[in-house]
Structure formats: C-alpha cells, structure tokens
C-alpha cells in the first residue's frame, strides 16, 4: 500500500481511510505497509509510527497487516517493530539494510542478531534493485531456520522465483510471495502463495481476480487479465521518466480517482499537470476498453 500524504511530513488521513476501505472492498487478503511503494525509507520515524497506528486502527483486524521495518539502523527497525506490535499488526517484513552493500553471510548474521528481539513473526523481502543484495536460495534457507515464515520476491527473476518454490515445496509453513505483478499466475500455479502488487492500490479487484484465476488454473481468464496488467504497466506505470515514476504513477492515479492526495515524499515530487492529464486520459482509455476496470468504479461507489 502507498502512504497517502498531504504535505512534507503529514499523513492524508482522509485519503488513508478511503484507500483502506477501497482495497478491502476490492477483496484483498492482506495489506503490506511501509514497503517500497509505501516510500518507507523517505519517511520520518514519527510519520511511520503515525501511519502504522492509524492504518491498523482503520483496518480493525479485518484482514492481516504486515509492516516493513527495514532500516539502516537496527534500533530504528526494532522501534518500528514495537510500534507495529502495539498497533495490532500481524507480521513484520525485513529486507537487506540499504546504502552499504551487504554480503550474504553478513545478512544472515544480521538476522541472527535482530530476530530474537522481534515481537512478531517476520517475512523476508528480496528487493535487490534497491538494496544491492539478491538473497541467494541458501541465504533464504538460513533465514527460514532462524524463523522466517516466508519471502516476498521482487527481483523480477522468474528462474529465481521458481527455484524458491522448488526449494520450499515441502515446507507449507514457508510462503513464497511474488512481488512482480506479471509473474503472479506462474507463482501461484507452481506452488507460490500469491502476490503483493502495488497496482492493487488502484485496481484491487482486478488483482484479486488475477490471483483467483491462477488458483483455479483458468488459463483463459489468466490470459485476459494478464493483457490488462500489461496495459496498466504501459499506461500507468510508464508515465514520466523518473526512476521513482512507479510510485508517482500510483499516487497520481489514486488522485485522479479522488481516493487520496498525490503528494510524494521528499526528495521526490509528484507529477505536474501534463502528466496528470495524461494519467486521466489513460485511465479513461482503460475504462473504455476493459469492463474489468469499470468494475473497480463500482467498488468506489460502494465505499463512497
């Protein structure tokens, strides 16, 4: 989930409530706070705390909540872990501390120190494009021995995703979760547990249907919905040229849908008028082309 903002270090609280009610009405099975799309690394500790507490209060245990606690500071991670526990979250998500590159064995050592101090179960988050380390299958096995209950893989490496599924196929207590939207059907069909999709902020029902089509091995429906997911990539995520355009695009689309503000955490800035107009045009094209997209607006009417 994104972190709705209305200024430099302020939550868009009304937008937060609208967004949570929207995605829950869309059928999502859980919410991941303070991940990459949630801009966690650009938010102050106080804002992260406010966000966790307010989001959990709105969700009210209706669906599970996971919270990303990765930080360059172990004390910062532990602080957010305690906040998450006290707010009522269900699990924590841990990636490799960023900025200085970390070796595989150093990450295992890090987990051996951190995990005994955690107040909640934890999942791994493999995000090598942002952390400079691609967790090896061996490292993931070590993490499972330390206590990890699953991994979200956002490497974009389908072969690696399959290797994880194969390695842990006899471990029902360890979940492989796909972070690359286009791979969700392949992940589920071959034994993964689902996906965590940034696009579900905008079209929650669509991604729930995408997952359920994979569960049912409905190849026709998978093909149809994959076509829409590809168009979302082209028409929403690829507006603008910034390396942070994915986050800007999701927030811009949500502002076009009047769900929440499009303010982006500093040092980045939201789209200008030209990009916002392009987003409006592209969303209208998606609505006109795909009835499945139109169905999302029926969800909006319910939440309103």
Image (cartoon, helix red, strand yellow):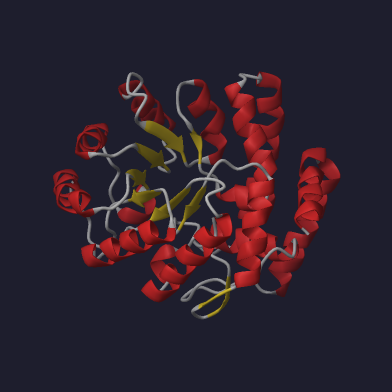
Q: Quadrant of the N terminus?
A: bottom right
Q: Please say whether residue 219 is visible from this viewpoint.
A: yes
Instruction: Write down the quadrant of residue 59 in the picture.
Output: bottom right
Residue sitting at the far right: 288
The residue shown at (72%, 29%) is 224
| Number of numbered markers | 0
How far across and down, in percent of the image, does residue 277 sit?
76, 67
Instruction: Write down the quadrant of residue 280 in the picture.
Output: bottom right
Most foreground residue, 77 or 109: 77
How far across and down, in percent of the image, does residue 177 sit?
44, 36
Above or below, 10 against 294 in this view is below
Instruction: Write down the quadrant of residue 246 in the picture.
Output: bottom right
In the displayed structure image, the side of residue 50 where residue 174 appears, left or right: left
Above or below, 167 against 262 in this view is above
Most foreground residue, 266 or 201: 201
Q: Please say whether residue 261 is visible from this viewpoint.
A: no
The residue shown at (50%, 59%) is 56
Q: Quadrant of the C terminus?
A: bottom right
The residue shown at (57%, 47%) is 62
How far across and down, in percent of the image, does residue 19 sit?
64, 59
The residue shown at (69%, 47%) is 25
């Amino acid at each position: 989930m994104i972190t709705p903002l209305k200024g430099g270090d302020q939550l868009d609280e009304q937008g937060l409530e609208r967004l949570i009610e929207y995605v829950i009405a869309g059928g999502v099975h859980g919410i991941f706070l303070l991940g990459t799309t949630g801009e966690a690394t650009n938010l102050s500790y106080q804002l992260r705390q406010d966000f966790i507490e307010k989001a959990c209060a709105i969700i009210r245990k209706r669906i599970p909540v996971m919270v990303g606690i990765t930080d360059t500071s172990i004390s910062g991670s532990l602080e957010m872990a305690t906040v998450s526990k006290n707010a009522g979250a269900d699990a924590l998500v841990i990636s490799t501390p960023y900025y200085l590159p970390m070796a595989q064995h150093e990450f295992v050592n890090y987990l051996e120190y951190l995990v005994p101090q955690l107040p909640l179960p934890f999942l791994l988050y493999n995000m090598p494009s942002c952390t400079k380390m691609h967790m090896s299958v061996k490292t993931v096995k070590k993490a499972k021995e330390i206590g990890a209950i699953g991994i979200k893989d956002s490497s974009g490496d389908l072969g690696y995703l399959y290797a994880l599924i194969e390695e842990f196929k006899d471990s029902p207590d360890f979940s492989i979760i796909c972070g690359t939207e286009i791979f969700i059907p392949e992940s589920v069909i071959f034994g993964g547990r689902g996906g965590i999709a940034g696009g579900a902020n905008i079209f929650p029902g669509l991604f729930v249907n995408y997952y359920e089509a994979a569960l049912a091995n409905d190849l026709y429906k998978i093909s149809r919905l994959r076509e829409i997911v590809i168009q979302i990539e082209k028409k929403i995520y690829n507006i603008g040229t910034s390396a942070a355009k994915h986050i800007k695009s999701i927030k811009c689309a949500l502002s076009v849908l009047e769900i929440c503000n499009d303010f982006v955490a500093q040092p980045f800035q939201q789209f200008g008028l030209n990009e916002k107009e392009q987003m409006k045009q592209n969303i209208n094209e998606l609505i006109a082309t795909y009835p499945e997209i139109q169905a999302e607006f029926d969800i909006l009417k319910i939440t309103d």
